[in-house]
Image (spheres, rainbow, N blue to C red):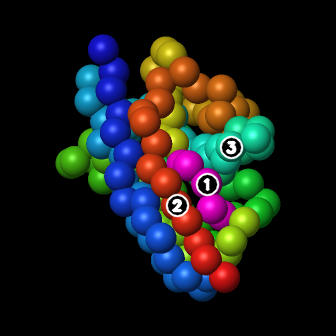
Amino acid sequence: QVQVAESGGGSVQAGGSLRLSCRVSRYSSSRNCMGWFRQSPGKEREGVASLDSDGSTSYADFVKGRFTISRDKTKNTLYLDMNNLNSEDTSMYYCAAPALPVPTCSSGYRGVGDFPIRGQGTQVSVSS
């Protein structure tokens, strides 16, 4: 059974940075599409970023230029580096993967919120 576990969330002031990590088990994060989405209470899920097996990335407009998705093949870990955070970024962040391994996220970041394989999430809180 595929498992993902997010970590790295926390509380920061506006303008600060955080690095989220996602440890992946029984699934190759380097050979397959994976991504990050976020969800706050009472709000819809938002796809944030996706990463294909060939290194192609896709970002939501609201994080472009501030967030970077990457992976470490040796650790089978997915990352999300978040810079210049603002209060709108406050949310629970989830790492996610599609039910069946595929090399490309066909819908880019937009589809990540629908991926069924996800962890418990990690909370990011940004104070202004």
Relative placement, left or right, of 40 versus 98 is right
Where residue 49 appears, as percent x and y from the top left, is 62, 50
In the rendered view, tell whether residue 121 sits above or below residue 25. Answer: below
From the image, tell me which residue sits under label 1. Answer: 91
Q: In the depicted view, which residue is nearer to us: 86 or 67? A: 86
In the rendered view, tell whether residue 122 sits above or below residue 112. Answer: below
Q: Which image quadrant is residue 24 in?
A: top left
Q: In the rendered image, which quarter contains the C terminus?
A: bottom right
Q: In the depicted view, which residue is nearer to us: 14 or 66? A: 14
Where residue 13 appears, as percent x and y from the top left, is 55, 82
In the rendered view, tell whether residue 19 sits above or below residue 119. Answer: below
Q: Of all residues shown, which one is farthest toward the left?
A: 74
User: Badge 3: few (under 14), some or many (20 or more) residues near its Cα, within 10 Å?
Assistant: few
Looking at the rendered structure, the secondary structure element under dot 3 is loop
The span picked out in magenta is 89-93
Query: Which label number is shown at residue 124?
Result: 2
Residue type at mark 2 is Val
**Among numbered discs 2 and 3, the one appearing first in the sequence:** 3
User: Badge 1: few (under 14), some or many (20 or more) residues near its Cα, within 10 Å?
Assistant: many
Q: Are marks 1 and 3 in contact (CB under 8 Å)?
A: no
Query: Which label number is shown at residue 123?
Result: none
Query: Which label number is shown at residue 41?
Result: 3
